[in-house]
Image: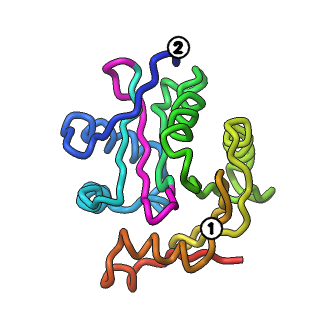
Amino acid sequence: MADNVLLKSIKNDRKAKKYIKKLYRISFPPEERAPFYLLSRKARLKNVDWLGIYDKEQCIGFFYILNYLDLSYVFYFAIDYNMRGRGYGTKALAELKNQYQNRRLFLAIEQTEKNAPNYDERVKRKNFYARSGLTAIGGKVREGNVIYELIGTGGSVKKEEYHLLIHSWTGKLMSKMVVMELID
């Protein structure tokens, strides 16, 4: 079970990144995925934390986090499908919250709209985060054509802060091509 959850950087770990690339493609639909090569390249930035979630020596998931000032945006979080339901996600989030306790930690989840094709899955995911102590912090985010609800801990996020955080990751040129904005 999830007694030995450890978070460690995988920025320079080829083996872990190979595994995470597969997990990433399985865990997120195409419209919600940034190109993996871009994630890898941008992970070299000082404001990016790419953390493997380990049970002893076995990588079972990951966090990809963008940091700016006191904001930490969990851009991606996934646990291996075969390891879900065993407490790993709960333990990993608890460890993450502990490591980022002096920061406004937040993430974006799919809206829980009744007409969504995966409505039950969305509700289950939202309830999981609520049990882990993450609550609505107000606002929504549009990333590409998908609109998400913001949840987190430590306080709300203002539009300008979100814009600066995303700009710090995308850079000047790419920020003009990527549609990622905090909306009301």
- Residue 84 location, quadrant: top right
Residue reaching furthest to the front: 102
Measure how far apart labels 2 and 1 are at the Cα level: 35 Å
What span is in magenta?
56-73
Secondary structure beneath label 2: loop
What is the x, y in percent for residue 120? 74, 43
Residue of label 1: 157
**Residue beneath the point at 54% across and 72% down:** 162
Instruction: Tell me the amino acid under the disc marked 1.
Output: Val
- Residue 181 location, quadrant: bottom right
Identify whether 52 is placed above or below 35. above
Q: Earlier in the sequence, mark 2 or mark 1?
A: 2
**Residue beneath the point at 45% across and 18% down:** 4
Instruction: Tell me the amino acid under the disc marked 2.
Output: Met
What is the x, y in percent for residue 13? 21, 38
State the mark number for residue 1: 2
Residue 146 shown in magenta: no
Looking at the image, how many numbered discs can be counted on the residues? 2
Mark 2 is surrounded, within 10 Å at the Cα level, by few (under 14), some (14 to 19) or many (20 or more) other residues, namely: few
Q: Nearer the viewer, residue 128 or 35?
A: 128
What is the x, y in percent for residue 38? 28, 62
Q: Which color scheme does this rendered protein use?
A: rainbow
Mark 1 is surrounded, within 10 Å at the Cα level, by few (under 14), some (14 to 19) or many (20 or more) other residues, namely: some
What is the x, y in percent for residue 127? 74, 40
Q: Nearer the viewer, residue 162 or 118?
A: 162
Q: Nearer the viewer, residue 40 or 72?
A: 72
**Residue beneath the point at 73% across and 36% down:** 131
Identify whether 3 is placed above or below 74. above
User: What secondary structure characterizes most of the magenta part?
Assistant: strand
Q: Quadrant of the C terminus?
A: bottom right
State the mark number for residue 165: none
